[in-house]
Amino acid sequence: MQKTSKSGWPARLSAWLVLLAVGLWPVQAQQTTLTVLTHDSWSLDKNLIARFEQESGLKLRFLKGGDAGEMLNKAILSKAAPIADVIYGFDNTLLSRALQADILQPYRSPELPNLRAELLIDHTFRATPVDYGYVALNYDREYFRGRPLPQRFADLASPEFARLLVVQNPATSSPGLAFLLATVAAFGEEGYLEFWEGLRQNGVRVVSGWSEAYYTHFTRAGGDRPLVVSYSTSPAAELYYSEARPKPTEPPTANLFLPRSSFFQVEYVGILKGTRNLRAAQRFVDWLVSRPAQENIPTQMWVYPARREARLPEVFRFAQVPPEPARLTPQQIAGNRERWIREWTQVVVQGQTAAAVKARR
Amino acid sequence: MTKGARRPIAGAHWLALPVLGFLALALLYPLGRIVALGLTEGFAAALADPYYRLRLAWSLAYGLGSSLLCIAVALPLAYVFRYRFPGRDFWLAFSVVPFVLPTLVVAMGFLSLVGPRGLLEVNLYGTPWILFWASLLYNLGLVLRPLVALLPKLNAPMQAARTLGASPLRAYLRVGIPLLAPALLSSGSLVFLFSFTSFGVPLLLGGPGWATLEVATYYALAQRLAFPEASALVLMQLGVTGGVLWLYLRLQVAWTVGLEGEDAPRPLVRGRALGLAIGLSGFFLLLYSPLWALLWRALERPGAWISPWQSPDFTPSLLALQNTLAFAALALLWVLPLGTLYAYAVWRGARWLDGLGLLPLMVSPVALGLGYLLVYPGLRGSVWLLIAAYTLLSYPLLTRALLPALEGLPRGVLEAARVLGAPPWRRFIRVEWPLVRPSTIAGLALALAAVMGEFGATLTLQRPEWATLSLAIYERLGRPGATPFYEAVVLAVVLMVLCTGLLLGLQKSAWAR
C-alpha cells in the first residue's frame, strides 16, 4: 500500500499538472482562423472586422509582434514554422529585409490597379501597399509658445534646444528607422553620424518604440520632451481624440517640417510562405485594400490610404504633407540599412565618437 | 567516502548513454555551431569593437563585485549565526528562497520598490546599485549557508593553534583563513558565474548603460538578427565561464579539508539574543524589501487582479498560465529520467561524467536559444525545442540533489540486498529508491521551479502560442501607462506563488513520511 503511493508520485504530479493545463484550455473554435501578424499600432474598426468575418466565414486573429522591425524579425526567425498567415505593417525601409529573407509569397491582388502607382515599389508582387504617411517631427505648441522653434535640421543639435527631443531606436522601431534615414538623406554619409553625435551630446532620449515616446516622454502626455519623432498626421489625431470641452478648433501639437527632416513611409501587407489558408489570406489582402477598410484606416492608424479614390476625413486638414520630405531609393536603403543602424547604435547607444566609427568602416 | 570503496561497474557507462546523447544533441552540437560561427565570422570584429569590450569589462566587474559583496556581507553574518537567537533558523532557511524565485519576479519587485513607479519614489532604474542589490538578494544564501555550517568547525583547530602559542590574530591568519578560503572561493566563484551570465535582471533594471554580455547578445539577435555577432559574444562569455568553472573544480579537489566539530549554535543571554534577533530581522527585511514592495503593489489595485485575464492587447494570461504549467509537466517527463539516470551513472562509477554534468550550468539560456535557432531551424515550431532547453537547464538541479543522497546510502543495506539475491532493478525499487526519494523530490521541486520561471531561453525561442507567465510580464513592461505595470505586478505575484508553493508543497511531502 505504502509502496504504491510512494512510487506513484511523479506520475501523479505530472497528471495533476497536465489536468490543470488541459482543464484551463479554452474550447477551440471550428472556423478557419486567419492569423495576422501586425505591429503594435494596428487598429481598425471592430464592426468593420466583424462584418468581414461574417461575410467571409473566417475568424481573424491579430497578433501584435512589437514594433515593425521586431515584428518582421519574428516572422523571419519563425520562417520554417510560420506564426501567422499574413503579415501587415512592414514598410519601405524594411521591405528589402522581408524580400531577401524570402518569407513572402507573391499575390497579385485584383485591386492593384486601384492603388496609387507610386506605392507599387515591389515588382515581384510579394508586398501589397496598404497605406502611406510621413514620419515627421512634432512639437508641443503649448511649450513653444513664446519660445523660438528650431529653424534648420542641424539646430536640433545646438545647445539652445538641448534635452528637448525624444526619438525611437531605429533597430526596433520603424519611425525611428525612417528618421535615421532622413538624417542620412539630409546630412549625407559623411555627416549624419556627426549630427547624431551632436544630438547625443545634446541629451537626445532614445526609447524603443513610438508609443513609448509619444505616450510617455512627450510633454503632451506628461513627459519632459516637447519634440518627438512621430507622423505628419499626429496633430490631426490629437484634435480628433481631444476630450477638451469645448472641442478646440486647432490641434495642441503641430508638425515641425524642417527641410528634409521628414521621411516618406509606405506600409505593406504580405502573405507568409507556408500558410495553410492561402485563399483566406488572399481574401484578407483584397479586403484590406478595399474601399471600406481603406476609408477606415485614416482615423484608425492615422496614415493615408493607398487606394486612390478613398475619401479622407475632414480632420485630415491638419495632416499636412511635408513640402520637402527626404527620400532614399529602395536600393540605397537595402544596401546600407544594417550598416546605418549598426553605426547609429555605436554612436548613440554605445557612446562612441563618429570619427572612431567611421574610421572602422 | 573514498574512491576505492566503489568499483566502477561496466553497466554504469551504458546508463550514461542516454544522458550523453541528450547532451550531444541539446548542448554540444548547438554550442559547437556557435563557436564555429563566432570564430569564423564575428569574433575579431566584436573584440575590436570598444562597446563590446566595455560590455565584457562590465560583466566581469559585475560578477567580481557581486561575489566580493556577497562574501563581505555573508562573513560577518555567519559569525552572528554561530549564536542561538529567535528567528535564526527561519532566516537561514529563507536566505536560499530567493534563489528559486524567477528573475521576472525579483525584477518586478525592484521596479515596485525603487523603479520609476516605485514605492520609495527613488528611481534607481538604470544604475549599477540596483543590479548589485539584486545580486546580493539572489546570492547571499549561497555564500552564507556553507559558511554557517563551516564556522563552528574552525573552533578546534583554532584552539589548537592558540594552545601551541599563536596569538589570536596569528591563529586566525594562519589557520582560520586558510580553512575558510576554499568555501569562500568556491561559493564566490558560483556567485561570479551567476552574476556574470545574468540576463533578466540587467535587461529589465539596468537600462542600456549596464547591459551584460548576455543582454548584448540578445539585442544583437532580436533587433538586428546579427547571428555572427551574437555568436561572437557568446564565445567571449564561454571563454570566461569555462575558465572560472575549471578553477572552481580544481579548487574543490585541491583544497577540500575534512573538518569535524560541534554543529549546534551557541546559547546567548536573553537580552543579547533578542537584540541580535531584532537587528538581523531588520537587515533581512531590508534586503528582501523588493519582495514586500511587490506584494504591496499587487494588493494596492484590486482591479489589476482581474484585468490581466481579459486584456485584449496582450497574450491572454490564461494561456500563459496554462503554458507555464504544461511546459513544467512536459519538462518533468524528461528531467526525471535524465536526472536520475545521470546521478545513478555517476554514483555507479562513471565519475568522468560528473564534470560533464556541470556543462549546462556554464551555458547561458540566451546562448542556448541562439544555438537552437541556428542548428534546428526546422524545429522552430515544435514545442520540444523549448522543452529540450528547459530540460537541459534544469536536470542538473535534480542530479545535484540526488547525488549526495546516493553517495550517502548505507553500504551494508545494499550489500545485504545483493547477498540475498535481489537483482539490480529490484534493489533499485525496493532499497535504493525509497531511501533517496526525499532528495529526489526536493531536487525535482527545484528543477520545476527553475522551469516555471525560466526567461532567457523562453524569450529567445519565443512564439506567440508559447507565451509563459514570464513573457506575459515582460510584454507588459514595455507599454506606457499604469495599468500594464500593475498587471505585470499581479502576474509576478502569481508566478511567485506558483513557484514557492510548488517548492514548499513538494518538499513537505518529501519529508513527511
Image (cartoon, coloured by chain):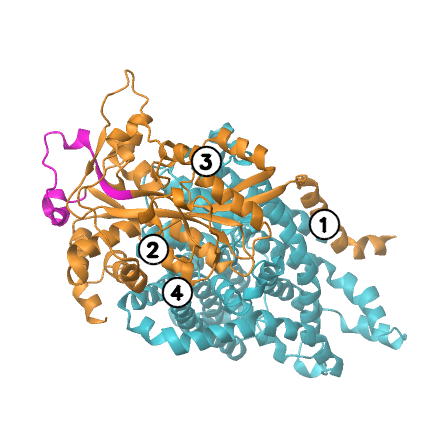
Chain colours: A orange, B cyan
Q: Are marks 2 and 4 on the same chain?
A: no
Q: Nearer the viewer, residue A235 or B441?
A: A235
Q: Residue at x 42, y 67 (%)?
A: B227
Identify the amino acid type marked 1. Ser
The Cα atoms of the two marked residues, 4 and 1, are separated by 48 Å
Q: Residue at label 1?
A: B509
Label total for image:
4
**Label 2: element kind:** loop
Identify the amino acid type marked 2. Ala
Q: Is residue B424 visible from the viewing direction of this image? A: yes
Percent x, y for residue B406? 71, 69
Determine which quarter of the picture holds residue B44. bottom left
Residue B226's disc number? 4
Contact, CB < 8 Å: mark 2 with mark 4?
no
Q: Nearer the viewer, residue B154 or A133?
A: A133
Residue A171's disc number? 2
**Label 4: element kind:** loop
**Label 3: element kind:** helix
Q: Residue at x 24, y 34 (%)?
A: A219
Mark 4 vs mark 3: in front? 4
